[in-house]
Image (tube, grey):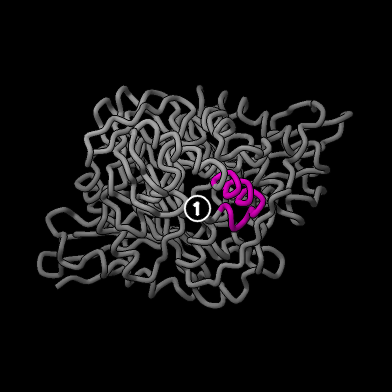
Amino acid sequence: MITVRQAAAKDVGAMRDIFLACYGTDYSPRYYDEDQLTRLVYSDDSLLLVAEDTESGAIIGTASVDLEVGARSDLVAEFGRLAVHPAFRHRGVGNLLMSERLLRVQDRIQLGFVETSMTHPYALQIAELHGFALIGFLPSRWRLKQRENLVLLARHFGNAQQLRKNDPHVIPEIYALAHLALENCSISPDVIVDEDAPAYPLGRTFEEQDFTTGGYATLLHIERGRVRHREIFGPMRLHYGVFKLQSRRSSYLIAREDGRIAGAVGFTIDPHDKAVRIFELISLHDEVIRFLLTNIERTWTGKLGGPAELVEIDVSAYAPRMQRTLLELGFLPVAYIPAFAFDEVERLDVVKMFRLPAPPEVNIEALTPRNRTLADLVLRRFRTRSVLPRVAAAVHHLPLFAGLISEQVTRLAGVCGTASFEPGKTIFREGETDYRMHVVLQGEVQISVARSSTFVGVVRDGECLGEMSLLTGAPHSATATARTYVETAVLEHADLGELIRLRSDIGLHIYRNLAVGACEKLKHMDVSAQRPLGCKNLL
């Protein structure tokens, strides 16, 4: 028989052995340190459980809830560190631990979330079985032997959804992720897209200063960003006190103008994970905001002894100017958390954004279709960002997109994915339907008609193929094969449809150009093949 109970000091050694059995020596050092585990056992901010085999008395599993994830009044908890000894898996131990955690904390919280590794699918299944909904994909989130990718899920408790502030305003790059996350949480999507929100200005230069107790009282007198008009959220707040901040490896970069403090940005460093989290931004006016977010990197680089491998920030879903600013500074959305932070009398949605030094290499095929859809949505932004200027340049010169201004081209390029093909690889086959168009960024693609063994032509850099399948869903009338190494920007039918729904001005240009260009292309292909093709869709 297996029972679940609250952990005691006598269980610390057994819990440590479970972590070693599950993760080797690659997990966070705090879970191998018996003194640290003992502190967690007695902490009021954590719930630590163990599963015990009553026949042998052996501790076979452990799980915890961190009740101090959000700010103190946010009532947010992380359901983390669920581990079952490999010798006792597939006996329902994980489900027992999750059920007991929920029973013990559900009256104390309004939002719980779970971060599960892609390499541990059972943890993901357990979370979904107990009502946690998919809200994000966190690439390169953990640093073990290599950086691990996590799936983020959340569940609301009590009246959290009733307290949620309606009608968040987000920039277009966040909309699809927000819509999907809200639907997964059984919340009617009410997100409003703000196309015109400008980023905060670069402004003038300010004097930088590390945080000291001398500036503490002055910062407490600044309301914007601290108690009013909060745009950045996190587990710490300035008013918690200097000692509390220092104990959590938290610090602030202060900006001064004419000798007075104009603002500060707070951040936490994890030296083991090589990660930084920005948790608070306080400012007297707009001009200091971008200065702080731009110059903070020098501060954490010095404290880490090198560049961060991950920078994380939670931004209000009602602050499109801050969202746009972070996007311009290299941050990309990875999760949308409904009703996350409590602010005044409402719970606010939050967008989690990451900045990574390079696009992550992730194989998401092992995920379920629903999880894969969200993961692909997140990862596509990282892949596209690295080639966005090339995609925009290629798209700008295509007849199908003639007449689009630079802003429209950037929006269109931003919804494209990327793909690569080795020589001889088939990009698509005659008769297939894949609802996508490829813009060739590099290489040459051979086009042929298999049914008549006819070579039609070659598509090169800056040209596109598959536009008719993209726009009409018609099967491809030819086969496209990579002659050399080929890299393409990929535009999906669903992504284009969503973009046109939000931006009808872009759709008008595309369909007008289609009407003009389709016949010209068909005439050209008719001549090349020296046979009548009628009005069939080619490619």
Q: Camera-side residue: 113 or 303?
A: 113
Q: Measured from the top left, where is residue 529 in percent x and y? A: 33, 33
Vertical position of residue 411 compared to residue 55: above or below: above
Please rate how many residues cluster around mark 1, counting C-alpha atoms within 10 Å: few if below 14, some from 14 to 19, many from 20: many
Residue on which disc 1 sits? 335
Identify the residue at image location x=33%, y=49%.
117
User: Which residue, as the protein is rendered here, is positioned at the far right?
Assistant: 258
Which quarter of the figure has residue 166? bottom right
Q: Measured from the top left, where is residue 420 in percent x and y? A: 35, 32
Q: Is residue 183 left or right of residue 92?
A: right
Q: Specify the amino acid type for callout 1.
A: Ala
Q: Bounds of the magenta span?
A: 499-514
Which is the main secondary structure of the residues drawn in magenta?
Answer: helix
Q: Is residue 398 left or right of residue 218?
A: left
Q: Measured from the top left, where is residue 200 in percent x and y? A: 75, 40
Residue 235 appears anywhere in the view: no
